[in-house]
Image (cartoon, rainbow, N blue to C red):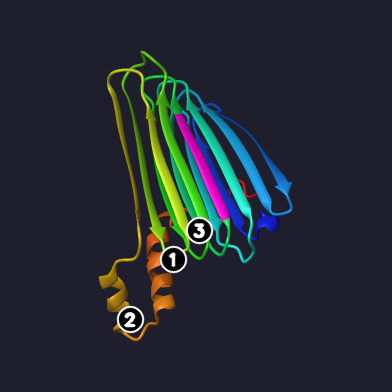
Amino acid sequence: MAEDSGSEVTIFLESAAAALPAEISGELCAVDGRAISAEERVTIRGHGRLRYILHVSPGEATGTIHRRLRCELVAPGASAEIFVLLHGKKKQRLSLDLHLHHGAGGTHSASTVRAVADGGSHLKIISEISSAPKIGPCSAAVDSRNLLLAPTARLATAPVLSIHGNGIACTHGATIGGPRPDELFYLRSRGICEEAAKELLCAAFSSEILSKIPTRLPGQII
């Protein structure tokens, strides 16, 4: 629980393999009274599989949360699924630095990022995929979609590809947009105020990630 920032940070880690597939290490430190910074490093070997879900919910206080995740897939059969939902309000500052590195052929990664910026919040998202040179075929994908709910909010996203080798199937995409006027009109025409209509659209936008979080978390919550 990132109490100093007023936001709640939930992490769910799930891994499965015949042998221990991942080495997970990280650190969480309060930079000052209103800032939280955390970094995790994950190494996946053999036929290890990692499922990582990060949810940063909006808080009532202003503050800063910065998260950095580096995931290395170092042996054939290793795979990683990353799901991230960030929601900023008021004057919060949220940033995510996500880096998946393919060190061997026969590996797979998929990252799904959703972010919502409201009020005067500032969000920054960097999602990077890289590969070692001269590795065999592997696949990677990044899908980053971002919702801007207020003209005073700021949201920046940058997908980065650093691929060195042939036979690597890699896709990436990033979008930023506001609520569709026709969707708002539809809800307003049914007696729903504009603020409530935006909340409904935000809930629908976030549901893809929220549905991945188990009711009871067997993983790690900080």
Foreground of the two, 11 or 166? 166
Residue located at (67% from left, 50% from top): 35
Residue located at (64% from left, 35% from top): 26
Three-letter code, disc 1: Ala
Q: Which mark is residue 188?
A: 2
Residue 41 in picture, x, y percent from top left: 58, 32
From the viewer's perspective, is 51 left or right of 4?
left
Three-letter code, disc 3: His
Task: Residue under label 3, please give it.
Answer: 87
Quarter assignment of residue 129: top left
Foreground of the two, 203 or 89? 89
Magenta segment: does it hold 94?
Answer: yes
Three-letter code, disc 2: Arg
Task: Residue under label 1, please give it.
Answer: 150
- In the rendered image, the vertical position of residue 181 relative to residue 133, given as above or below: below
- Mark 2, residues whose alpha carbon is within 10 Å: few (<14), some, or many (≥20)? some
Point out the tag, 1 or 2, that comes first from the N-terminus: 1
Residue 204 visible in the shown view: yes
Foreground of the two, 200 or 108? 200
- In the rendered image, the vertical position of residue 101 relative to residue 127, given as above or below: above
Q: Secondary structure at mark 1?
A: loop
Front position among marks 1 and 2: 1
Residue 72 in picture, x, y percent from top left: 49, 27
Magenta residue span: 93-100
- Mark 1, residues whose alpha carbon is within 10 Å: few (<14), some, or many (≥20)? some
Q: State the CA–CA distance, disc 3 to disc 1.
A: 13 Å
Foreground of the two, 6 or 49? 6
